[in-house]
Amino acid sequence: MTHEERKTLIDRYAAGVGEVLASLEGFPEQAMTARPIPGKWTAREIVHHLGDSESTSGIRLRKLLTEEFPVIQGYDEAHWANALRYNERDHRPALELFAQVRLATTPLLREMTELEWARQGWHTESGLYTIEHWLEIYAGHAHGHAAQIVRLRNALAA
C-alpha cells in the first residue's frame, strides 16, 4: 500500500464519525429501537456496535503497535448485541465512545512510520493480521453502518 493510499483510507476513517452523525440527524428518538427491516439491527443496536467495535479496534491497533506479533481476539457481534442489551440501553454514551476513540486514533495513524505500518499479528478468526488490513477494514466500517441507519430511516418513512 502506498503512502497516498494510506492517507486516503485514514481520511475516510476520520470522516466516519461525521457520516454516522449525519445518518442519525433527525432520526426519531422513539424509533431508535424500531426494527422496520426484519432480521436487521435497529439504529440503537448499530450505535452500540460502533462504540464496542471502535473501542475493540483501537485496542487491536495499539496491540499491533506495541506487542511482538500479538494475538487479536475475534468476537461474536450478534452475541454481544444480545448479551450486552444493546437495544435496552441509552445509545448516546456508545456514540460518544465511538467518536472519541476515532478522535484519539486518527492522529496516531497519521504519524506512523513505515516500520510501524509493517507490524503484524495473528487474528483468531482470519489469520495473519496487518495494520494495513486493519485500516482497510475500519476505514469503511462506520460508513457502512451509517448507510444502514439511513436505510432504517427510509424504511420507517415508507
Image: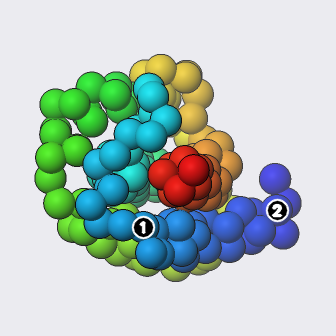
The tag on residue 8 is none
* Mark 1, residue position: 27
The tag on residue 5 is 2
In the depicted view, which residue is nearer to us: 133 or 79?
79
Q: Residues within 10 Å of mark 2 (few under 14, many from 20)?
A: few
Q: How far is disc 2 from disc 1 in space, using C-alphas?
A: 34 Å
- Residue 2 visible? The answer is yes
Tag 2–tag 1 contact (CB < 8 Å) = no
Q: Residue at x 15, y 53 (%)?
A: 89
Q: Quadrant of residue 79?
A: top left
Q: Quadrant of residue 91?
A: bottom left
Q: Secondary structure at mark 1?
A: loop
- 2 or 1: tag closer to the N-terminus: 2
Q: Would you say 28 lies left or right of 137 here?
A: left
Kind of residue at badge 2: Glu
- In the depicted structure, whether residue 38 falls above or below residue 140: above
Q: Residue at x 57, y 50 (%)?
A: 158
Q: Residue at x 67, y 67 (%)?
A: 12
Q: Would you say 124 lies left or right of 13 here?
A: left
> x, y (%) of residue 133?
64, 43
Q: Secondary structure at mark 2?
A: helix
Q: Name the mark nearer the viewer: 2 or 1.
A: 1
> x, y (%) of residue 73?
36, 30
- Residue 3 visible? The answer is no
> x, y (%) of residue 106?
52, 73
In the depicted view, which residue is nearer to us: 37 or 120?
37
Kind of residue at badge 1: Phe
